[in-house]
Image (cartoon, rainbow, N blue to C red):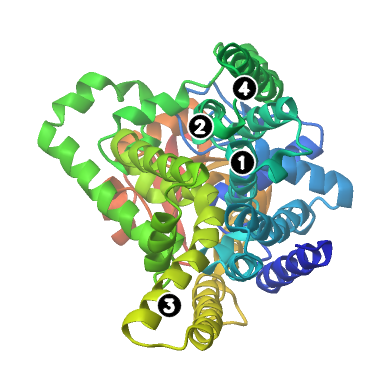
């Protein structure tokens, strides 16, 4: 593969992402809002802190609160670097790095495909599939971890291919010590991007153990080399993660925040917003009954497999990916990738079923996407070969036809899904930005009602409200009006903005807004009910 080829695919990746990003003037949803808001504070010199709370899992003392107690910081760091580089404290400035990351995914996929197959035609087709990533495109240019997972997941696969390949030409100029160190470093970066990224450290150690027999030396030297490789891998990992562990020890008293472990004991997704969080215990989880526990995981499995088919497999690619992976099953990298996918599915189905099917699997699975795109052309070749034998297809003509067809289908699916998610029914008013526009109108209404700049609100998306208006906000807790009053009084909150997406316990006060003990109904703006805490008057 030539450098020119990689540059072309980089340009294509950038271009397609920019086409969609043109209509995205805001981060778009809470995860991306969070990384943008905390990245902005980092760039401004406010450190890892957040003047909002989107959950109460680590029992926060107040505002500002130490940030990234639940999500990992890499996306925020990347947003901050973009802002510092562009000197633009806006979403446009923050997302520059993410667009560049999106551009790097197609050439990386080309490289990975060529490492696995040594076929230029396979690699070029895989690159086109990465340029047109279907459901993922809407999220590639915003401040989230999808592109990061694809980039470093694909890079990890490429490193694993270099390590496990028995072909001497692939290893001729590669220093094995540096390769071990790089595997650990990439694992650390993936952990810094997402909490479940720690799985890749285990995968890296397993990769070092799977060094091909053809490249092994004498047993004693082999064992010593393995120990050295694992040590260097750990050094690479901890070189990335130790600063973050130290920060967490200072702030939370542990290398990792305790917030994430409480999600082990959820019996419903909305309980992630429970207040107070100390009710989320193993005993309470067990008391829900084994039938409910099993049902939650069965539902998560079904939802995650649907996500695998529709998102990772892009529907039409799924059979080809499976056939291609099976054809390549002897390749250690494919086996490692399959194992990593199973581990992610296990984690997001059995351990964290609610956060898993509500987005965790969608995010984490992106790390395997370059491998899946690399497998699809192999699967196509197998299918065409079957057609040539059984249906008497002209092999070369059929391959050309189906390759163009795959790219065409990828283009069609990408356009449909991106336009639906970003533009909606009115292209002149993209649905992607509507939430932020509503928040601006709500904040203007609060100002007219006499709200002071320091007044805090309860709202559905606190990072998004802060990122849009600059006003501190906290999440509406799971429960009724009485429960919502507890964090409001504890943290000095004055207003609650009740949107159509609200806890079930507040449904009555959304459908029929009225005063209630502790709350005064002030009015409705853009379908949002505005309540004020009566005790503060």
Are the residues tagged 2 and 4 within 8 Å (C-beta)?
Answer: no
Report whether residue 81 is seen: yes
Label whose residue precedes the other's in the sequence (2 or 4): 2
Residue 16 in the image: x percent, y percent?
A: 68, 72
Q: What residue did someone put label 4 on?
A: 217
* Dot in front, 2 or 4: 4
Report whether residue 517 is seen: no
Closer to the camera in the image, 174 or 420: 174
Are the residues tagged 2 and 1 within 8 Å (C-beta)?
Answer: yes
Left/right placement of residue 257 relative to residue 448 reads: left
Label whose residue precedes the other's in the sequence (1 or 3): 1
Q: Residues within 10 Å of mark 2 (few under 14, many from 20)?
A: many
Label whose residue precedes the other's in the sequence (2 or 1): 1
Q: Residues within 10 Å of mark 1 (few under 14, many from 20)?
A: many
Label 2 and label 4: CA atoms lie apart by 23 Å
Q: Residue at x 52, y 44 (%)?
A: 333
Residue 203, label in figure:
2
* Dot in front, 1 or 4: 4
Label whose residue precedes the other's in the sequence (1 or 4): 1
Closer to the camera in the image, 98 or 230: 230
Residue 384, label in figure:
3
Tell me which corner region of the image, top left, top right, bottom left or bottom right, holds residue 403. Answer: bottom right
Left/right placement of residue 225 relative to residue 257 reads: right
Under tag 1, what secondary structure? Answer: helix
Closer to the camera in the image, 103 or 85: 103
Q: What residue did someone put label 1 on?
A: 156
Q: Residue at x 72, y 60 (%)?
A: 103
Q: Residues within 10 Å of mark 4 (few under 14, many from 20)?
A: few
- Position of 116 relative to 413 (above/below): above
């Amino acid at each position: 593969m030539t450098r020119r080829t990689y540059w072309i695919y980089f340009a294509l990746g950038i271009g397609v992402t920019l086409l969609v990003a043109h209509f995205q003037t805001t981060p778009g949803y809470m995860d991306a809002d969070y990384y943008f808001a905390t990245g902005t504070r980092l760039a401004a010199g406010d450190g890892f802190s957040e003047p909002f709370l989107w959950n109460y899992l680590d029992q926060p003392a107040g505002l500002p609160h130490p940030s990234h107690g639940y999500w990992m910081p890499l996306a925020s760091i990347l947003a901050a670097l973009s802002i510092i580089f562009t000197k633009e404290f806006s979403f446009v400035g923050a997302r520059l790095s993410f667009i560049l990351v999106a551009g790097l995914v197609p050439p990386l996929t080309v490289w990975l495909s060529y490492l696995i197959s040594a076929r230029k035609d396979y690699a070029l087709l895989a690159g086109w599939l990465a340029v047109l990533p279907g459901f993922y495109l809407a999220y590639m240019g915003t401040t989230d971890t999808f592109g990061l997972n694809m980039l470093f997941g694909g890079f990890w696969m490429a490193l694993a291919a270099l390590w496990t390949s028995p072909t001497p030409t692939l290893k001729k100029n590669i220093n094995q010590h540096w390769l071990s160190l790089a595997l650990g470093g990439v694992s650390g970066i993936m952990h810094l991007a997402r909490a479940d990224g720690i799985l890749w450290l285990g995968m890296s150690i397993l990769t070092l153990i799977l060094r091909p027999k053809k490249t092994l030396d004498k047993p004693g030297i082999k064992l010593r080399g393995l120990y050295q490789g694992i040590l260097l891998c750990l050094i690479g990992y901890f070189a990335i993660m130790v600063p973050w562990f130290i920060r967490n020890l200072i702030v939370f008293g542990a290398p990792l925040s305790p917030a994430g472990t409480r999600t082990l004991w959820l019996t419903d997704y909305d309980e992630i917003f429970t207040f107070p969080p100390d009710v989320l215990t193993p005993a309470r989880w067990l008391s829900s009954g084994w039938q409910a526990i099993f049902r939650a995981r069965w539902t998560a499995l079904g939802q995650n497999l649907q996500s695998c088919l529709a998102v990772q497999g892009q529907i039409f690619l799924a059979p080809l990916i499976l056939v291609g992976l099976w054809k390549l099953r002897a390749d250690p990298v494919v086996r490692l990738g399959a194992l990593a996918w199973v581990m992610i599915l296990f984690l997001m189905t059995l351990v964290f079923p609610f956060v898993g099917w509500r987005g965790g699997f969608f995010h984490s699975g992106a790390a395997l996407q370059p491998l899946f795109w690399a497998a699809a052309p192999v699967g196509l070749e197998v299918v065409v070969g079957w057609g040539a034998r059984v249906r008497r297809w002209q092999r070369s003509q059929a391959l050309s036809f189906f390759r163009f067809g795959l790219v065409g289908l990828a283009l069609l699916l990408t356009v449909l899904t991106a336009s639906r998610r970003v533009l909606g029914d009115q292209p002149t008013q993209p649905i992607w930005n509507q939430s932020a526009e509503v928040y601006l109108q709500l904040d203007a209404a609060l100002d007219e009602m006499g709200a002071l700049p320091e007044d805090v609100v309860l709202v559905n998306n606190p990072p998004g409200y802060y990122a849009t208006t600059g006003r501190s906000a906290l999440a509406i807790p799971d429960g009724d009006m009485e429960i919502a009053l507890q964090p409001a009084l504890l943290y000095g909150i004055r207003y609650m903005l009740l949107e159509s997406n609200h806890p079930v316990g507040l449904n009555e006060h959304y459908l029929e807004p009225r005063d209630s003990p502790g709350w005064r109904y002030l009015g409705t703006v853009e379908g949002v009910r505005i309540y004020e805490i009566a005790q503060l008057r």
